[in-house]
Image (cartoon, grey):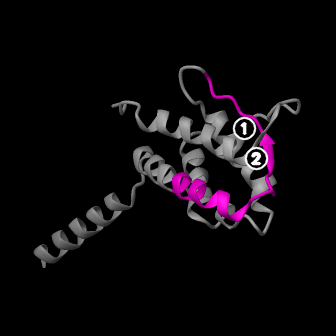
Amino acid sequence: MMKTILLLTFTVFVSSASLKNDDKTILGELIDELNATMKRLPEEHKGKEIYLKELKPEKESCKHDFFCHAEQELKTEVSVQSKYEDFRTDKKLMRNLNMYNKHHGGSTCRPADEDQEQISLRQFLCNLMICVKKEYNKPKKN
């Protein structure tokens, strides 16, 4: 009986520990999804480029607001269009971006400036990739 209880306790502990997504895992998946999405982009959207607000990350690090604004821009400008399958909110790219934002202060952020310049979706994704890689390569805090 005692062995069974210990075994069940251990099983619950191991299964719950493996479900925890840390930032490194989420950022790694974001890098993979951004790479895959950017490879498919030229084939699917020739001559039908979409433009988004240019988000400028802080010089030293990419703050939560950058990722929050990126998610908002992609949701409002790209996810709603049926031709952009990779950006649907139920797809891995958007789910991981949302999960990362929830880990860092929720999904609300101060509104982006309305007078920001517009850049192409491809350039927007490149800027997002730079920020994701910068955060991914940061040493882990204890």
Q: In x, y percent, where is residue 5?
A: 19, 73
Residue 2 shown left or right of residue 25 in the figure = left
* Quadrant of residue 12 within the rendered picture: bottom left
In the image, taking residue 53 as reference, residue 107 lies left or right, namely left
Query: Residue at image x 56%, y 62%?
Result: 92
Front-most of residues 127 and 100 = 127
Residue 27 forms part of the magenta stretch: no
As shown in the figure, which amino acid type bears the numbered disc 1? Cys
Q: Name which of mark 2 and mark 1 comes first in the sequence.
A: 2
Give how far across and how far down residue 124 sits, in percent.
68, 42
Say which of 52 and 40 sits in front: 40
Q: For the C terminus, which image quadrant?
A: top left
* Residue numbers of the magenta segment: 33-58
Distance between the Cα atoms at labels 2 and 1? 12 Å
Mark 2 crowd level (few <14, some 14–19, many ≥20, 10 Å Cα): some
x then y, percent, for residue 138: 41, 31
The circle on residue 61 is none
Q: Is residue 49 magenta?
A: yes
Residue type indicated by callout 2: Glu
Quadrant of image for the N terminus: bottom left
Query: In the figure, is residue 113 to the left or right of 122?
Result: right
Whether residue 65 is situated above or below residue 8 in the rendered picture: above
In the image: residue 54, left or right of residue 38 = right
Q: Tell me which residue sits at (11%, 74%) in the image.
A: 3
Q: Secondary structure at mark 2?
A: helix
Q: Residue 117 at what x, y percent from top left?
A: 82, 32
Name the residue tied to disc 1: 109
On residue 73, the disc is: 2
Q: Residue at x 41, y 48 (%)?
A: 22
* Near-viewer residue (32 or 12): 32
108 is higher (above) or lower (below) than 113: below
